Image (cartoon, rainbow, N blue to C red):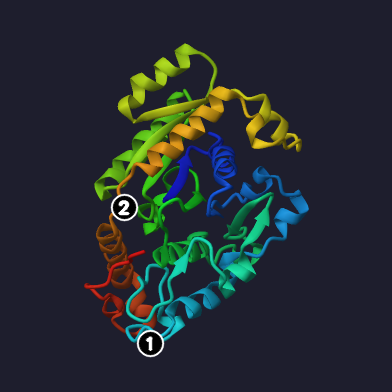
Amino acid sequence: MKTAFVGKGGSGKTTLAALFARHLRSRPLLAVDADINQHLAAALGADPAAAAGLPALGAHLDEIKDYLRGGNPLIASAAAMLKTTPPGPGSRLLKVVEDNPIYDRLVTDVDGVRLAVTGPFSAEDLGVACYHSKVGAVELLLNHLVDGAGEYVVVDMTAGADSFASGLFTRFDLTFLVCEPTVRSVGVYRQYVGHARDHGVAVAVVGNKVEDADDVAFLRAEVGDDLLCWVGRSAFVKAAERGRFRPIDELEPDNAAALTRMQAALDARPKDWARYAAQAADFHVRNALAWGNDRAGADLTGQIDPQYTLTH
């Protein structure tokens, strides 16, 4: 299953994404940092200097395109691929865990979690590029990734409504929206679900920094049945934020139970490959008509094979 963590900046979405990835690390798992603030590696326990030096997906976009294109006759060249280009006949598909040149070069083991990062916004990008040009590498990977039962992809997304700047937000079976018991955090929730549900995106709210029954009552009143579970203030998390990482089985029982409930909710989601392909095609057409066709000098909507869907 594929899942994303979203929410207001500072809500703790990266912390919860890291906890959830560590909770799942005995399973086939790929974690991806797709946030402009690249902190997932450090949250997983990587040394800050080592985290800053991880190979970046965004710096290898041409290689990723060339590999995924494979022998697809609908795609003239890697240069003609957009971030939204869907797979078709002859495309190379990815599994969550396998040997391939993309993973070999760009996926790193961080304390038992296989991690890929988009890379930071660099000085060379200032004034000439947006961060979503880097996140496009993640969208391409997910468009070509076939996950099976008991396999997981966990993505830490950009904060707030920035996630809607591309079709990446549709690439998940269930999105966990991390929400503090505050008016501002609830405001981000309302904005997010308003867009997400227009596209059939399933969202579950995970409360964070919950201290008492009043906090739970506030969240229930504001988000209703979307509230799946909540995580309380945690000495385990505080220690990690100060660089002292303990085994995940030492997480407080109530907080560990929240992770288990999140996994159960994710596992219970139905897999709908036809919808997945239709959403990919929809956003590819939007991008092709908005700017891709002009840049390529060709009609890139022809890259879509309407009969093609991913299957495991």
From this view, report whether residue 203 is shown above or below residue 55. above
From this view, report whether residue 214 is shown above or below residue 147. above
Give the mark nearest the N terminus, 2 or 1.
1
Kindly state the secondary structure of the residue where label 1 is placed. loop
The outermost residue toward the left is: 307
Kindly identify the residue that appears in the image at 26 percent across and 58 percent down.
275
Kindly identify the residue that appears in the image at 41 percent across and 57 percent down.
148
From this view, report whether residue 226 is shown above or below residue 35. above
From this view, report whether residue 232 is shown above or below residue 188. above
Q: Nearer the viewer, residue 5 or 251?
A: 251
Q: Which amino acid does label 2 sit on?
A: Lys
Q: Position of residue 39 (x, y in %)?
A: 63, 47
- Mark 2 highlights which residue? 271
Q: Which of 82 and 265 is in front in this view?
A: 265
- Mark 1 highlights which residue? 76
Report, in whole angstroms, how far the alpha carbon at label 2 lies from the one at label 1.
31 Å
Q: Residue 195 carries which label?
A: none
- Closer to viewer: mark 2 or mark 1: 2
Q: In which quarter of the image is residue 19?
A: top right
Kindly identify the residue that appears in the image at 43 percent across and 79 percent down.
69
Q: Quadrant of the C terminus?
A: bottom left
Q: Position of residue 273 (x, y in %)?
A: 29, 60
Do the residues under discs 2 and 1 have CB atoms within 8 angstroms? no
The crowd level at tag 2 (other Cα within 10 Å; few <14, some 14-19, many 20+) is some
Kindly identify the residue that appears in the image at 47 percent across and 24 percent down.
182
Q: What residue type is labelled 1?
A: Ala
| In-image side of 281 versus 154 (left or right) | left
Viewer can see residue 53: yes
